[in-house]
Image: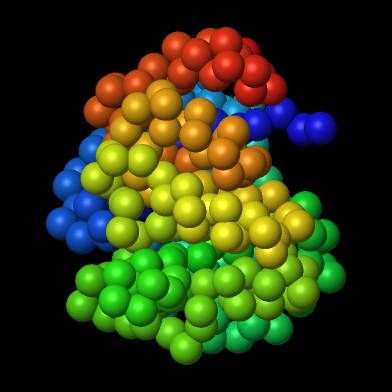
């Protein structure tokens, strides 16, 4: 059984790391490369970088900072942002990323998932899913272009259906970005994670809502996720990664210690 992963998330806009609440009102956190280096030194298992406006702007992530990150860290990292072709993905992998993630481009062209998996292998193809819980209908819906609040739109997809679709097409991992929980630090949506776990056979990364160490423990033990992604609690140094890992091991979570 693979060890669980702690994954800091770095949302990138205009060359800097930013963080919002429920995908809105982003504030500048700092520069990309120093933050990446800090998290690697603090014991992160992996990093995820989202160029949050690349898809809505119709461009691909800036590869210059990808190369700089690869030079200063020795842990795996994943890059997302406007990847629409096999060639786009290949360039990012060539510049040093270990995985690429697609979100809005996969919704526009689901066959892209299969093309990427066939070319580079499922192990480095991640699909990000931005999901919103509708309290009236009690359903989970997939949203698109969430990096630009003026262009964010609901898609035709129910979250559970889309999870199954991307698996069939070759996704090697799924990051579930729970929009209702994003940045509010009141815990991951355990009910949604459990529902997704029921239909998902590939690794699931929980994203959105971490505020305490117990929230990470709940995601691992109750929802059986493979990794837990968080941003603000790490950016603002509310939770120390080494202390978090020590806490998790005390409760039997199999995780790599710093």
Q: Is 33 on the left or on the right of 254, as rendered?
A: left
Q: What residue is rendered at 82% in x and 60% in y?
A: 121
207 and 115: which is toward the camera: 207
145 and 98: which is toward the camera: 145
* Residue 111 drawn above or below residue 195: below
Q: Is 167 on the left or on the right of 157, as rendered?
A: right
Quick check: can you spot residue 198? yes
Q: What residue is rendered at 58% in x and 16% in y?
A: 251
Residue 25, image x, y percentages: 15, 57
Quick check: can you spot residue 231? no
* Residue 77 drawn above or below residue 122: above
* Residue 223 drawn above or below residue 94: above
Q: Quadrant of residue 112?
A: bottom right
Q: How is the image coloured?
A: rainbow
Q: Quadrant of the C terminus?
A: top right
Residue 250, image x, y percentages: 57, 11
Residue 198, image x, y percentages: 67, 59
Q: What residue is rendered at 63% in x and 51% in y?
A: 204
The image shows a total of numbered marks equal to 0
* Residue 73 drawn above or below residue 17: above
Q: Quadrant of the N terminus?
A: top right
Q: Is 234 on the left or on the right of 6, as rendered?
A: left
218 and 100: which is toward the camera: 218
Q: What residue is rendered at 36% in x and 41% in y?
A: 187
22 and 20: which is toward the camera: 22
Residue 222, image x, y percentages: 57, 39
């Amino acid at each position: 059984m693979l060890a669980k992963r702690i994954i800091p998330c770095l949302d990138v806009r205009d060359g800097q790391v930013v963080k919002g609440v429920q995908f809105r009102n982003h504030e500048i956190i700092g520069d990309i490369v120093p933050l990446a280096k800090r998290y690697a030194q603090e014991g992160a298992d992996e990093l995820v970088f989202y160029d949050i406006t690349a898809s809505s702007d119709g461009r691909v992530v800036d590869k210059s900072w990808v190369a700089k990150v690869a030079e200063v860290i020795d842990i795996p990292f994943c890059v997302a942002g406007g990847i629409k072709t096999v060639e786009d993905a290949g360039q990012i992998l060539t510049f040093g990323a270990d995985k690429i993630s697609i979100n809005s481009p996969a919704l526009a062209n689901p066959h892209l998932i299969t093309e990427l998996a066939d070319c580079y292998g499922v192990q480095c193809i991640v699909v990000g899913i931005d999901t919103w819980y509708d309290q009236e209908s009690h359903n989970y819906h997939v949203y698109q272009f969430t990096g630009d609040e003026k262009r964010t739109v609901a898609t035709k997809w129910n979250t559970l259906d889309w999870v199954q679709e991307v698996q069939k097409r070759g996704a090697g991992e799924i990051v579930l970005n729970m929009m209702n929980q994003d940045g509010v630090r009141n815990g991951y949506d355990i009910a949604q994670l459990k529902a997704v776990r029921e239909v998902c056979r590939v690794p699931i990364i929980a994203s959105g809502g971490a505020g305490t160490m117990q929230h990470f423990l709940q995601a691992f033990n109750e929802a059986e996720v493979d990794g837990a992604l968080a941003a603000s609690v790490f950016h603002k140094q509310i939770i120390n990664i080494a202390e978090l890992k020590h806490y998790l091991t005390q409760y039997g979570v199999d995780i790599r210690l710093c």
